[in-house]
Amino acid sequence: MKIEIIDSYKKISRRVASIVARQIIYKNRSILGFATGSSPIGTYSTLIKMYEYGIIDFSEITTFNLDEYYGISEDHFQSYHYFMNTNLFDHVNVNRENVNIPNGIGDPKTICEEYNKKIDSCGGIDLQILGIGRNGHIGFNEPGVEFDSTTHLVELKKETIEANSRFFDSIEDVPKKAITMGIKTILNCQKIILIATGIEKAEAVFKTVRGKISTDTPSSILQLHPDITLFLDEEAASKL
């Protein structure tokens, strides 16, 4: 596990975007894993600029997102389909047939099985971007998740619902379930980048890096990944 402590979110975003760009240039048919939330927005903004400058080309890239709220449609303004379109896909030349985000509507068992098959058919993910929740969740893998899980339906914890309520009109509007890529699938990614900023993430970062590997902190399993780098600001790294 490698750690880079960088003094601003803007610099972190540029650093992560440069790694993603290098992956795209090195392998123009890369399989990229994307995350949502506030952590990767700056990275996506930088990637858009790189595309506009002609540095990178998304036309042969395949993407898989970590998760999606269950029970809301793709066009809902808080769906992760909407998030990815708004923050990245609408601004680059990605082939929409190669964009994969779990469906939030339908039979969850079928949705999960089909998503797993798609990932497997591509040979797995080359580079996965992660954020981290205050309780150590990665994707929507909440405390107590099985480490051998693949894509599955999850009940969101109270603290996750509360944290995400800032994006909704009220806490009652936040979905209580989500479809998420599982821990096993994440660990099978060739390379992982985790972004964490702010003092509110410091405890989760500490448990991820220094804590006992336990399902109580799902992110702690990342200690076992052979190629993971954490990009942290000074606040997020303050307890290390």
Image (cartoon, rainbow, N blue to C red):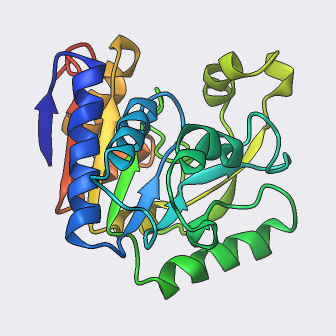
Q: Residue drawn 44% across and 59% down?
A: 33
Check the image and report above or below for 113 versus 45.
below
Q: Which of 144/7 is in front? A: 7
Q: How many numbered callouts?
A: 0
Coordinates of residue 28 in the picture (x, y in percent): 31, 72
- How far across and down, in percent of the image, does residue 15 sit? 20, 37
Q: Is residue 211 visible?
A: no
Q: Residue at x 30, y 21 (%)?
A: 9
Q: Quadrant of residue 191?
A: bottom left
The image shows residue 122, relative to residue 21, as above or below, that is below
Position of the C terminus by quadrant: top left
Q: Toward the viewer: 227 or 59?
A: 59
Q: Position of residue 231 (x, y in %)?
A: 23, 34
Of all residues, the one furthest to the bottom in this rendering is: 121
95, 110: nearer the viewer: 95
Q: Is residue 196 visible?
A: yes
Q: Would you place residue 71 above or below residue 150 in this image?
A: above
- Above-or-below relation of 48 to 37: below
- Residue pictured at 81% horizontal, 16% vertical: 169
Give the residue furthest to the front.
Answer: 53
Residue 108 place in picture, x, y as percent: 79, 65
Q: Quadrant of residue 203?
A: top left
Asked whether, in this view, residue 30 is left or right of residue 153, the answer is left
- Report the side of 20 relative to 157 (left or right): left
